Image (cartoon, rainbow, N blue to C red):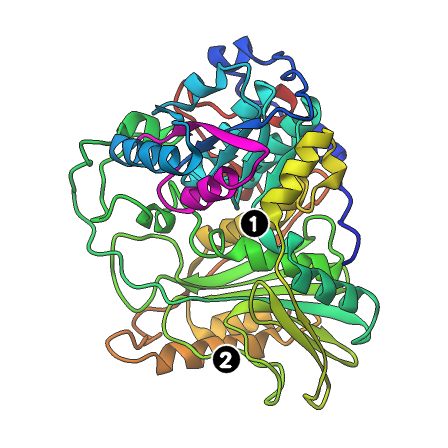
Amino acid sequence: MSRLPRRRFLEESLLAASAAAGLTSWNRAFAQTRSTPKKSANERLTVCVVGIRGRGSDHLNAFIQRPDTEVAYLVDPDESIGQQRVKQVADKQGSAPKYVRDIRRALEDPGLDIVTIATPNHWHALAAIWAMQHGKHVYVEKPGSHSLGEALTCVAASRKYNRVGQIGTQCRSTRGTIEAIRFVHDGKIGEVKLARGLCYKRRKSIGPAGNYPIPPEVDYDVWSGPAPILPLTRPQFHYDWHWQRVYGNGDIGNQGPHQMDIARWGLGADRFCDWVISYGGRLGYEDAGDTANTQTAIYGFGDKTLVFEVRGLETQPLRPHPDALGAMIGVIFYGSEGYVVMDSYTHGAAFDLQGRMIAEFRGDGDHYGNFVEAVKASNPELLAADINEGCLSSGLSHLANVSYYLGKPANLDEIRSVLKELKTTEDPLATLDRVVEHLRSSPPPETVDLSKTPLTLGPLLAFDPVACKFPNNPEANRLLRREEYRKPYVIPLPEEV
């Protein structure tokens, strides 16, 4: 297994961030909280899991099974799932955790060591920042933030309070992926200047927009957190928030950060992009969602290009060569002497230009275990996915959405005229043609007539990867973070953390 990647820093970017609103009074009261005392080798680390319905159940299982950790707190605004999980944890662990609706109640415990976060996206950054300000180490699921601006503050908090911060991009700890990236970096497929990330993941309609009742067991004020209090317009309260941009980031910010991370890693792109453009739409049905279910993003990194494709309707795998593996949720690296295809989290293969397999990569890993070992050593350098890596990878998803949300409906000729001017190491017109064919061939009733429901074409946006701003573009810069946060759920700027 190759050596775990070192932390990469964004100090220049953080220093360049502009000033805005200050810390809330609750934040300020704990801004200088000291680190929790170091535990002896025989003591178990105490864990608080925040968000325990979906992905959080995996967190619970991981830490319950470890002899060196104990789940001490469960946090969720939904009391029904909270009480249910208390019993489940007690049955498996032998001791019952405390359940609270509000993370602040758990953070006040000085004996708490670790906070893991599997909340909706709009809560990721604030939960992580508050936890680090209280001296806790943090494991947060991707994307780790709802916007790039929030991600920068998370990195600043980790650095200021010297807390271990791991992002849940598990492939960073997966042997199959590590070996594939080493194969690419060792030049085994020649020079690699193009990577393509894929999220071909069927997503059905979430139902018609309307005015639906808030589940009575949910504290909606706490659930909303930094977001505004809005009527519930989707039929299913849980999970489908992913497809409403006030809470989620669409699949480019949901599934996407996993494959975006691998693609960026393989390209050696250890910074944000120089420019981005995105096009797509919510196509095939009309529902309560307002994020794209079909989206292409193209990023420029000097002489390298990263392309990301989201397809939420029925589709077929993408193959770099007819004889190579097909990928649906995966990554393809295009080299001058061959291809590497990652077709799952734990498996991939390399092929020559004729499509003959020349190497295969497989193997799982222990991302939670990597995190715990870094916490025990109080050494973020041991992390496979330091919070800065998550900031960079998820940040690319956020940047694509900025372009997309600034876009306007465009016909295919208009889109082609823009794409053909891009200076990339891929053929953006060929990518567009594949997207169009996919939409036209989707089975009824989701076949898309682009003359009636055209694609949305976002602007080509130059980006300064050091200042973390769009130069001379106030409209785009306004979308780098939420314009207003609800008190007391205010996320500070990096220099105010």
Q: Is residue 191 left or right of residue 20?
A: right
| Residue 415, above or below 374 | below
Residue labelled with disc 2: 433
Image quadrant assignment for residue 191: bottom right
**Residue 249 percent across, percent down from the top left:** 44, 48
How many tags in the picture?
Answer: 2
Quadrant holding the N terminus: bottom right
Q: Earlier in the sequence, mark 2 or mark 1?
A: 1
Spot occupied by residue 46 in the image (x, y as percentages of width and height) = 54, 26
Q: Secondary structure at mark 1?
A: helix
Q: Is residue 189 left or right of residue 229?
A: right
Q: Is residue 273 visible?
A: yes
Residue at coordinates 57% horizontally, 18% vertically from top-left? 134
Return the x and y of residue 72 as percentages of the image width and height.
46, 26
Q: Amino acid at mark 2?
A: Asp
Vertical relation: 389 (above or below) 325 = above
Q: CA distance from mark 2 to mark 1?
A: 23 Å
Residue labelled with disc 1: 399
Q: What residue is drawn where x is 61% and y is 47%?
A: 367
Q: Which residues are magenta?
A: 52-77
Contact? badges 2 and 1 (CB < 8 Å): no
